[in-house]
Amino acid sequence: MHTVSMARALVGLWFGVMATVAQAASLRTVTDVWGGNGTDNIAQGCTTYGPIPDLGSFFNGGGFRVLGGNEACGYVGVTSDKTAASGPLLTQQTLAPVPLDTVGGTYKGAAGARAAYGSLGVASSGIHVGASGSTTAVFSTGAAFFQDTLTASSPLVSPSAPGFVRYVFSMDGALSAPLDQRGTASVQLNIQQGSGQVLGLGRLAVQAGDLGAFSAIDSNPGGWSLGVGSVAGADVFGSTVHVPFFGDVDLPMIWGSPWELKVGLLAQSGHTSDASFLSTANLVDVQVFDAAHQRITDFTLVSSSGTDYLAPVPEPATWGLCLLGLVAIGMRCGQATANRPRTRSLS
């Protein structure tokens, strides 16, 4: 498809889903850690696997679920799904070593999640000793969400006039998958405005023995150091799509009318690996534009949660950085603080 036509189609799709019913502001954390070999019972549905359904629809993955039931199919794990209207909402879970065979094979893992309006953090890790089979589970997941209703107004723009909005997030942390340990780890930041499509703002991933990978919807090259089985660093992700020969495509909104924003952060670890992003991501800037895509700086932004998203984001408390006391590999408390970027505009 021609880039201009693609951009226009994208804008048209987003405008078509702006009118949604406002929902109450909410926070959510999900932690999910499972180990074991399972029963391999086909008739019972023990060989059909998938993610936690709504994590799968928002992130295209996340969590471990067996059609026949995790515990009924012989897996051992811990799982939590919490919601709250105010925060911060914190969850931490650890899974004690689960035997995988009779010769000392085990898996143990940990997951954590922190949710506040404008600030999310996740972590997951595991240690896998020994071999694994086709039905072996060695997975850890942490996910965090905030959902809020926003309304922008400005003396420079008429109420009910069309406009655009851009979200800017800072994120910092590290992924690790040691060589010869078969580990994989990833973290991704997604947003959804109204009932529109879910947008993946940024994703980092590692696999043991391979170079770490990074991608961002705004094409920002990022401040990440990519090594073999590792990613570490910090930078910002914006929600803008840069279309060649067309320009910036931002999310549509109507001045003076509320719109819904949902933000999610997911960390996943498999085998022996670690994802340490518990102090991030933070919504550090909300930029708004008129119908001609001229940036408006004299505006107010009201949220149903009462959060001031235009105020500076505070540094997370020490407990926020060190929530996971049993992170298995490579998490150094304070590393995220040292790597945190200064806020900068993506305009």
Image (cartoon, rainbow, N blue to C red):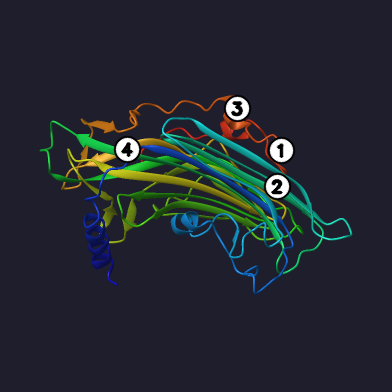
Label 4 vs label 3, nearer the camera: 3
Image position of 220 with respect to 37: above or below: above
Compare marks 1 and 2 and give the one earlier in the sequence: 2
Q: Nearer the viewer, residue 302 or 32?
A: 32
Mark 1 is on which residue type? Leu
Label 3 vs label 2, nearer the camera: 2
Question: Badge 3 local density, few (<14 within 10 Å), some, or many (20+)?
Answer: few
Cα distance in 3D space between marks 3 and 2: 20 Å
Measuring from the top left, give residue 186's x and y in whole percent.
Answer: 58, 53
Q: Mark on residue 326? A: 1
Cα distance in 3D space between marks 4 and 2: 36 Å
Q: Which residue is mark 2?
A: 109
Question: Badge 2 local density, few (<14 within 10 Å), some, or many (20+)?
Answer: many
Mark 4 is on which residue type? Val
Measuring from the top left, give residue 120's x and y in whole percent.
Answer: 49, 38
Element carrying mark 1: loop
Mark 2 is on which residue type? Gly
Label 4 vs label 2, nearer the camera: 2
Compare marks 3 and 2 and give the one earlier in the sequence: 2
Q: Tell me the quarter of the image containing the C terminus.
A: top left
Question: Badge 4 local density, few (<14 within 10 Å), some, or many (20+)?
Answer: some
Q: Nearer the viewer, residue 344 or 179?
A: 179
Measuring from the top left, give residue 46's x and y in whole percent.
Answer: 65, 67
Snapshot quadrant of residue 38: bottom right
Q: Which residue is mark 4?
A: 286
Mark 3 is on which residue type? Trp
Element carrying mark 4: strand
Q: Mark on residue 319? A: 3
Element carrying mark 2: strand
Compare marks 4 and 3 and give the one earlier in the sequence: 4
Residues at discs 4 and 2 in contact (Cβ within 8 Å): no
